Every structure is written in structure tokens, then in C-alpha cells.
DNA sequence: AACCGCTTGTGAACGCAGGAACAAAGTCGC
DNA sequence: GCGACTTTGTTCCTGCGTTCACAAGCGGTT
């Protein structure tokens, strides 16, 4: 059977997605091959780390030359499963939800929104990126009809858990949550949390620490 | 001077922000004290890890009882610097930028947008959350006048680097970047990258891996 | 006043990610 | 054809984060 199942670490998968985007840009620019150093610089990572990440895919470069852009791009795309189109549903069509629905980058990465849902009647019926906004009552029906396995939650925090429950009940197995609450989901369902304000908070703390350190130096000097 | 500078790890800081949000919710609900187990469950982390995170703040709980909600909340808020108002500027008022400018959660966390900027003339002049959208030409002026040290980039990828350059030149020291490009900034400037499509890609990969594993079991059985 | 149960805080071990250094391999020049 | 240079792929190592497990401490009870 499959002789080796390497089990690529999650951190590497995240970086592979970044490499893929950089490689796509290089390929569009007509570039034919690239070295690990240059690719690492464009992706903002260490060259050695990049080579280690790529080693999980097996040998895919030529020593003394570098990597062939198109080949490497296709190899990563294959591992990440970009070639297959993944049906996704998106719940909560506020500003953030609209931004996600409109984002062109998803389409080229294998994601296809097959349903946009919102609870507010005034939003239902609007069209965003060619898709109509539907009432949440149709959620189960659409998930069943389209076999969507990925759900994105961009609702206010207070309804996120109930939306999560409905998504998992309808058969969604992977959930990306932008609402600032920790969701509980049944086993076998992956939940990833993205908290925009936490990112800002960490950034502010680092800046504050840096400022405090500078003050300390000044005082101790 | 300061006898101990504990140097809180970055991963802990991110979780502290989550605890702070949970504690604020509990306090609003009239809750007076809470145990590490319950708080960890609400935050979606391990209880032992939570206690270790909190240990960086010094002892702040009572053994046998738990943590006093209001006290712990204020302690964390003090460490994260939430009490002080931090002026921020936001560049790129598309759907994502509008969502960020509108998000009420930032204000209660010590962040205050003092400038919204966009290059598109049709967006300039609109008011979002009480702030007018200004042309990017005024960026340096506003940063100087408000002493903003945090900049948020929500522009398309192709202009993100030039916006970053202008922000750093104007004196911004911390940058949160939502554009899907790796930014290069001078030393002393912190850049944090949030890539929405990468999160979705990782989620899809994990789901694909899980599906493949199930198939393998089936085949080998 | 002493005991018991509960919860915090900390110490140690484990596993993982990141970085540097080195060997293998292929190409270009002579 | 051979040598030197370049770049990959791998190995080792260091440090960090996470988890488990236990000792310390406080409140309630008898």
C-alpha cells in the first residue's frame, strides 16, 4: 500500500500554502526556476527551514540549480489538494463575511463558496460575487445538496456556537471560526479559530515591551 | 529598578488576550470567581497550561478556591496594557478594512483608530464608525499628529509593501498585515502577518488527511 | 484546634519546531 | 575529461512550548 505516510506537520502545511502563492506569482511572471534562498526570502522564512519543509514532499529540486517553478508549484498544489474544488459555506455576511465571499484568492486555491447565509432579512437576496445571500433556514438543505464539508463562521459571537451546531449537524467536518468565542464541536470535526483582535493585542504588547526595554536601558544607563 | 522582568512568551500573551475576553464576559454576567478548569474550558485550552500562563503574572489565585474574576481581569488588562489607549491607523478601507474599523471589540481593548485611509477617491469622505476616510496622501501628517505607533494594512497585495514603507517612514513601529505578501520592514519594526486563505488551506488539508486516513483504514481492513 | 478536600502553583519530562552546519549531487568552465 | 562551484537534502543540536504529576496552601467542617 502506501509505503510511507510522512504526516506533514501543521506548521509546514501553513508555510507550503505561502510557498504556493509565491510560486504562482513567479510562474505568472515567466520565471522558470528559483533557489531556496530566493524563495525563502520572498516567503519571509529561513532558507534551511524551507528546504526542510520541501523535503516532506520528497526530492523535488536539482542540486546546484534550484527548483523548477512550475513543477514545484504543481507538486505543492497536489499535496495540499488544490486541484480538487472544495465546496464551502459561509455564514454571516457582514463586512467580514462580504470580504471573504469577495476574495478572489479562494477560487484559485480550490475553494468554492456554494452558499452564503445570513440571519438578517435585509441582507438576504443581495448578490455577492455571483452568489445570492440565503436565509439561514436553508443551511441544512444546501449543505446536504452540495456536500459541503467546510464551513466558515463570520457571525457575531453570541450566535457562533449555534451556527456551529447547525453546521456540524448538517455534515460539515471542518470549521473556520472568526467569531471571538471558543467553539465546542463533536469529535471528528476540526475547528480553527482566527481572532483578529488577539493579533492586534499581541502586537501592542510586543511594542509596549520594546518601549519598556528602551526606557529601562535609559534608566539603568 | 524592576527586579524581575519575566519576559512573557508570545504564545502566552495570545492566550492571555483570550482569557481577558472570557473574564470580561463572566464579570458582565455577575460571576465573582472561577476555577482554572472552568476558565480553561471556556477558553479552549488545557487547565495546567492556563495556570502556567497565569503564573507569569505572579500569584493571583487562592488555593482551594480559584480566581476572583474582576481581580484577574484587571491584572491581565494591566499586563497587556489595555488601560492605555493606543492610537492606530488603518490603510485600505475595502470590505475587510470596513469590518476592522467597525469592530467594536477593539475599543474596549485599548485600541483607537485615529485615521482611516484609502487610495480610491470614491471611498474618501465616507464615514465609518464616526471616522472619515482620508486620502493616503494625509497618512504621514496624521501619524505625526496623533503619534500612532500601530498600523493595520488591509489593502490589496500589490500595494502593501509601499504602504508598509510609508507607515514605517512616518514612525509606525508595529504593523498588522492582512495582505497576502511577506513584508520587509526595517529593524525595530514588528510585523505580524494574518493570512486568511492560509488558514482555510490548512483546514482543508487536515480534513483531506483525515479522509485519506479513513480510506486507508478501510482498505487495509 | 485539627483534619480533609479542593485548587493553585511549580517542577520535570516529553515532543516539536527552528537554525546551523555538513555531505551528496549536479552543472559550468577549462 | 576533470575540477571547482553552487545548491539541495539531511543530520545534529539547541531552545521552546506543552503536558503530566505532585507538593503547597487555604477554606470548611467537626
Image (cartoon, coloured by chain):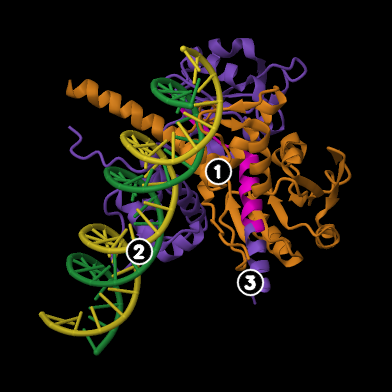
Chain colours: A orange, B purple, C yellow, D green
Query: Is residue A7 shown above or below A72?
Result: below
Q: Which image quarter: residue A130? A: top right
Question: Is residue B139 covered in magenta?
Answer: no
Badge 3: chain ID: B
Q: Residue A74 location, x and y as percent?
A: 68, 40
Q: Which structural element holds mark 2?
A: loop
Q: Is residue A124 left or right of residue A156?
A: right
In this view, the residue in front, B207 or A124, is B207
In this view, the residue in front, B96 or A82, is A82
- Which quadrant of the rendered structure holds the C terminus of chain A? top left
Prevailing SS of the magenta stretch = helix
Q: What residue sits right under mark 1 in the picture?
A: A59
Q: What residue sits right under mark 3 in the picture?
A: B217
Q: Residue B118 location, x and y as percent?
A: 67, 19
Q: Which image quarter: residue A218? A: top left
Span shown in magenta: B188-208
Amino acid at each position: 500500500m502506501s509505503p510511507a505516510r510522512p504526516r506533514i506537520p501543521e506548521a509546514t502545511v501553513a508555510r507550503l500554502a505561502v510557498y504556493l502563492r509565491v510560486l504562482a506569482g513567479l510562474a505568472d511572471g515567466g520565471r522558470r526556476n528559483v533557489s531556496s534562498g530566493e524563495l525563502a526570502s520572498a516567503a519571509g522564512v529561513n532558507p534551511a527551514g524551507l528546504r526542510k519543509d520541501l523535503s516532506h514532499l520528497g526530492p523535488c529540486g536539482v542540486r546546484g540549480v534550484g527548483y523548477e517553478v512550475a513543477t514545484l508549484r504543481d507538486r505543492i498544489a497536489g499535496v495540499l489538494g488544490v486541484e480538487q474544488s472544495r465546496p464551502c459555506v459561509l455564514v454571516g455576511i457582514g463586512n467580514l463575511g462580504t470580504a471573504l465571499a469577495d476574495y478572489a484568492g479562494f477560487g484559485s486555491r480550490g475553494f468554492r463558496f456554494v452558499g452564503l447565509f445570513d440571519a438578517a432579512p435585509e441582507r438576504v437576496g443581495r448578490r455577492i460575487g455571483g452568489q445570492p445571500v440565503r436565509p439561514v433556514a436553508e443551511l441544512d438543505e444546501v449543505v446536504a445538496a452540495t456536500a459541503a464539508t467546510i464551513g466558515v463562521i463570520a457571525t457575531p459571537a453570541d450566535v457562533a456556537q449555534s451556527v456551529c451546531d447547525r453546521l456540524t449537524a448538517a455534515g460539515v467536518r471542518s470549521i473556520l471560526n472568526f467569531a471571538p468565542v471558543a467553539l465546542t464541536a463533536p469529535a471528528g470535526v476540526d475547528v480553527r479559530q482566527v481572532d483578529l483582535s488577539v493579533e492586534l493585542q499581541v502586537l501592542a504588547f510586543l511594542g509596549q515591551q520594546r518601549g519598556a526595554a528602551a526606557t529601562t536601558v535609559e534608566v539603568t544607563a
